[in-house]
């Protein structure tokens, strides 16, 4: 019987996994510089967490969650996004009581959504995201955006566009909500069933509908910008001012609403302008979600964050023809000749690895020529040749595979010899 991988998932095999590791290491490094700390949450949570946190009018909750009953008849859901879990962890672990505020968190891990698989859209996908909880300063909004843009740019992406909007505070949103209801209600029967359900619950979500995006009422819908009260407009101006000081360019888009119910004030998306990237150009998005912590049972706490898909990031890199500088070589390959040398190589290889030298040897009883071919395939920087005669002399021949230079080295000193040579190549 042959087993196939489930639809909407992928195997990340050697040769590709190194790209993921490189991106993840870059993400961790930029978080270190911005003073964000890793949070790891369960892959599944109680279903109500996402119903309350993400919003029951969203496509995620209504159509895309992987939900199941466990043996205790509890409803559990594989996490479809990271913010709800992060806020739940923030409340459960009383991080709001920490002396250092805001609490700045990041996560990297798999998420799950049941949707039609397509390029850059998987049923299991990996998100990198950050959350900053505990500050109402517009500068932290700009910082979150700067971190996202910075990671893309440090990986080499150039064809980026940042779209920015404000959804306003509760008062502004309520005024805008009433205007949207008045606008859409007379002709709501012309819209899809999802939009009809959203009219009273969350009419802002109608603007995010993919089915009815070409309807004429979409183009004439009231703009949130016209309903921002003085406080919301001032807050948004401070966010833009901070971005200007950071030399981060942005495009104002009053139709940008994001797909989750918990957003207010700042909302943003980062798009790829690369030719051939695809119809879905969004790389990442996020925004402010004041009120979500209270919804999870915590104290009144402001928050802002974003999430990006690693899969879509890889697509953008490919579209721009960017090759990541992933290390594909090893430091040393031990070639053996003779039974005694083959047995002794076990200890030698272990010694080199313990010294921090990436090392490989033959496990298929290949001839010397075959071992050298294997070393070439692995792009080994050095080959250490050990025969029975070398063992008698207590030495080993080390060959530089680029220059061809070869030198006899004491077996006791081979680790330090290779370490020095590798440091010289690295310019240390």
Image (spheres, helix red, strand yellow):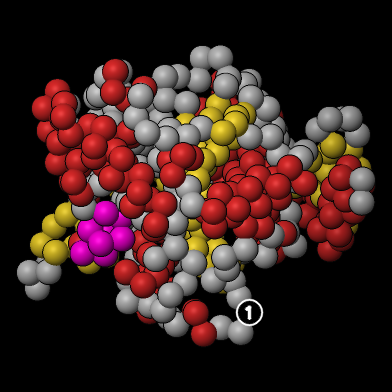
Query: Residue at 31% of width from left, 40% of height from top?
Result: 179
Residue 338 can be seen, yes or no: no
Q: What secondary structure predominates along the stretch shown in magenta?
A: helix
Q: Is residue 403 magenta?
A: no
Q: Is residue 54 magenta?
A: yes
Q: Nearer the viewer, residue 279 or 351?
A: 279
Query: Residue at 46% of width from left, 39% of height from top?
Result: 226
- Residue 272 is situated, as x and y percent measured from the top left of the image, at 55, 26
- Residue 4 is situated, as x and y percent measured from the top left of the image, at 23, 34
Residue 107 can be seen, yes or no: yes
**Image position of 145 with respect to 194: above or below:** below
Q: Secondary structure at mark 1?
A: loop
Query: Residue at 65% of width from left, 45% of height from top?
Result: 240
**Image position of 112 with respect to 273: above or below:** below
Q: Quadrant of residue 211?
A: top left
Residue 380 in the figure: left or right of residue 424 = left
Q: Write down the residue under mark 1.
A: 100
Q: Nearer the viewer, residue 246 or 391?
A: 246
Residue 377 in the figure: left or right of residue 226 = right
């Amino acid at each position: 019987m042959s087993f196939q991988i489930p639809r909407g998932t992928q195997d990340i095999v050697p040769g590709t996994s190194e790209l993921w590791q490189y991106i993840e290491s870059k993400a961790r490094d930029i978080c270190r510089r911005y003073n964000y700390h890793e949070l790891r949450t369960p892959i599944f949570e109680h279903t109500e967490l996402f119903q309350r946190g993400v919003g029951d009018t969203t496509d995620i909750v209504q159509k895309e969650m992987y939900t199941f009953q466990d043996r205790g008849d509890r409803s559990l859901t594989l996490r479809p996004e990271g913010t709800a879990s992060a806020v739940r962890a923030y409340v459960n672990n009383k991080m709001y009581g920490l002396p250092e505020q805001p609490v700045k968190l990041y996560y990297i891990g798999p998420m799950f959504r049941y949707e039609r698989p397509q390029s850059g859209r998987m049923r299991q996908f990996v998100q990198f995201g950050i959350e900053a909880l505990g500050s109402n300063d517009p500068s932290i909004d700009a910082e979150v955006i700067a971190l996202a843009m910075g990671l893309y740019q440090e990986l080499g992406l150039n064809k980026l566009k940042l779209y920015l909007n404000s959804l306003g505070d509760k008062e502004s949103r309520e005024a805008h909500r009433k205007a949207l209801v008045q606008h859409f209600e007379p002709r709501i029967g012309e819209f899809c069933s999802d939009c009809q359900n959203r009219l009273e619950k969350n009419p802002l979500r109608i603007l995010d509908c993919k089915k009815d995006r070409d309807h004429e009422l979409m183009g004439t819908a009231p703009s949130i910008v016209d309903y921002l009260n003085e406080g919301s407009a001032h807050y948004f101006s401070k966010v833009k001012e901070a971005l200007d000081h950071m030399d981060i360019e942005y495009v104002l888009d009053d139709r940008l609403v994001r797909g989750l119910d918990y957003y207010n004030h700042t909302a943003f998306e980062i798009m790829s302008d690369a030719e051939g990237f695809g119809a879905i150009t969004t790389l990442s998005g996020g925004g402010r979600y004041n009120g979500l912590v209270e919804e999870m049972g915590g104290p009144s706490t402001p928050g802002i964050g974003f999430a990006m898909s690693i899969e879509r990031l890889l697509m953008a890199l490919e579209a721009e023809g960017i090759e990541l500088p992933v290390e594909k070589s090893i430091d040393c390959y031990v070639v053996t000749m003779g039974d005694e040398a083959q047995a002794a190589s076990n200890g030698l290889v272990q010694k080199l690895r313990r010294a921090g030298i990436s090392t490989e040897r033959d496990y298929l009883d290949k001839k010397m020529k075959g071992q050298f071919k294997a070393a070439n395939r692995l792009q080994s920087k050095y080959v250490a040749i050990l025969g029975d005669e070398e063992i008698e002399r207590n030495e080993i021949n080390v060959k530089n595979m680029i220059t061809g230079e070869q030198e006899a080295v004491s077996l006791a000193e081979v680790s330090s010899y290779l370490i020095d040579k590798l440091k010289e190549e690295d310019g240390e």
